[in-house]
Image (spheres, rainbow, N blue to C red):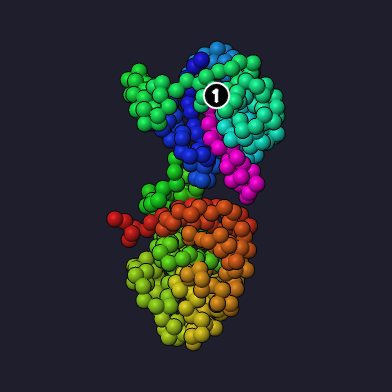
Amino acid sequence: GGPVNVYGIDCGSSGLKMLDGLPHVGEIINGDDVERVGRLLRWLRDLADDRAARYSEVRASTIVEYRTLADQPAEKRIFVLVDGMSAFREAYEYSKLSALWDIFLQLATDGRPLGIHLVVSGDRPNSVPASLLASIQRRLVLRLSSEDDYLSMDVPKDVLGQASPPGRGLLGNLEVQLAVLGGNSNLAVQAREVHKLSEAMLRQGVERAPQIERLPDQVDLDILPAGSPDLPVIGVDDETLQPAEILAKGPLLLAGPPGAGRTVALVTLAYALRRSNPGVELIYVGSRRSAAASLKLWDRSVVGADDVEETIDELVDYSTGTPGKLAIFIEGLTDFTDTGAESGIERLVTASIKADQWVVGESETSTWSSAWSLAQPFKSGRRGLLLNPGDIDGDSLLSTSLGRISTDFVPGRGYIVGRGKVRKLQVALPPENRN
């Protein structure tokens, strides 16, 4: 009884996808979409905590009691469907995503009285672990491959057999036949019936369930808050979908493969700092001419190994004489290797770090390992912005594991690494990159 919202995690053959159009179905998420699965589970955890506090205030032990005692008949039950439990376990229980598995188990244990229910499907009895099985109140057993499987599920072995039709099963002490929308097992027919049902529900005014939002592929820096002088906002955080800040002090390693958006990110970092700290001086140092070098954003721009070599002493003296008052952005840092400016760049980076300046070094991921002396201050700082990294880039560049990485290549999608912690984000576009 009462209103219901439904969410699905599809680790099977996309069989749940046809439910996506129903208004009370908030989202059907592919099991590989770690970002949104994590966001769904964290949202449900926070919702469970909120409901536990609200229910205790009116001394309600279940959602049914809360609806009555608090006069809140619209409080929604939430069903979470997980299709393909074996694949879900493999992806989340035995991996670096085990924290999400722990949230899932917590919801299974504590969610039922709060109106949060899990419905899971498995292709064999042992696909559901004992830790989860203990929290499951009811089991529907369909046709299994062997008699021993029925015994392990504690149901009679002589009721279902090879001749049993699809959907025939055992629910407690009952033999049941599952209904099919439209009365036809053809998926196309079922999909049409789901569409008709959706239209009927909308006509009756059924409220649409909240969706689980995605991290945007693009976001303009100007629509985000500026942040504070030492913590400028540079994009959108994946976990919270809130503005993402970065510490504007010390060395920062900026890396990524070709096409990942490194130059745009470098400019974004500079614009973000100027927005949050208008009095800071921005110095650009480039190994070669680029679109970024000529921007009016910079207070000073030095390009090419020869010009850098000529002005490096002046830059070092200026940086050490104005501690904490400027930021240095070096594009193509590793390209200075084996040039006359290499030792000067090394001195500038070291001196500026000691003077509490922000020093951002940018280069393609594959080049950092061949520029040992120039890369060392950035690697030892273990702080960086890694755009579209590979599986081992966090370990090799900053001695910090990034965990499971999405295979989607989105320019500006990256990870902020600092103090051994990792945060995924979408780097915002600076004003020059607006369409």
The residue lying toward the viewer, choosing from 46 and 307, is: 46
Asked if residue 154 can be seen in this view, the reply is yes
* Amino acid at circle 1: Ser
The residue lying toward the viewer, choosing from 427 and 150, is: 150
The outermost residue toward the left is: 435
Q: Is residue 294 above or below residue 173?
A: below
Q: Residue 94 colored magenta?
A: yes
Residue at x 39%, y 22% (from the top left corner): 182
Residue at x 40%, y 31% (from the top left corner): 187
Asked if residue 36 can be seen in this view, the reply is no
Q: Residue 57 colored magenta?
A: no
Q: Is residue 163 above or below residue 408?
A: above
Q: Is residue 217 above or below residue 397?
A: above
Image x and y of residue 375, in percent: 56, 73
Magenta residues, start to end: 79-100
Q: Is residue 165 left or right of residue 161?
A: left
Quarter of the image where the C terminus is located: bottom left
Image x and y of residue 11, in percent: 52, 40
Look at mark 1 in the image and give the residue it sits on. Answer: 164
Categorize mark 1 by other alpha carbons within 10 Å: few (<14), some (14-19), many (20+).
few
- Tag 1 secondary structure: loop
Tell me where residue 176 sits by quadrant. top right
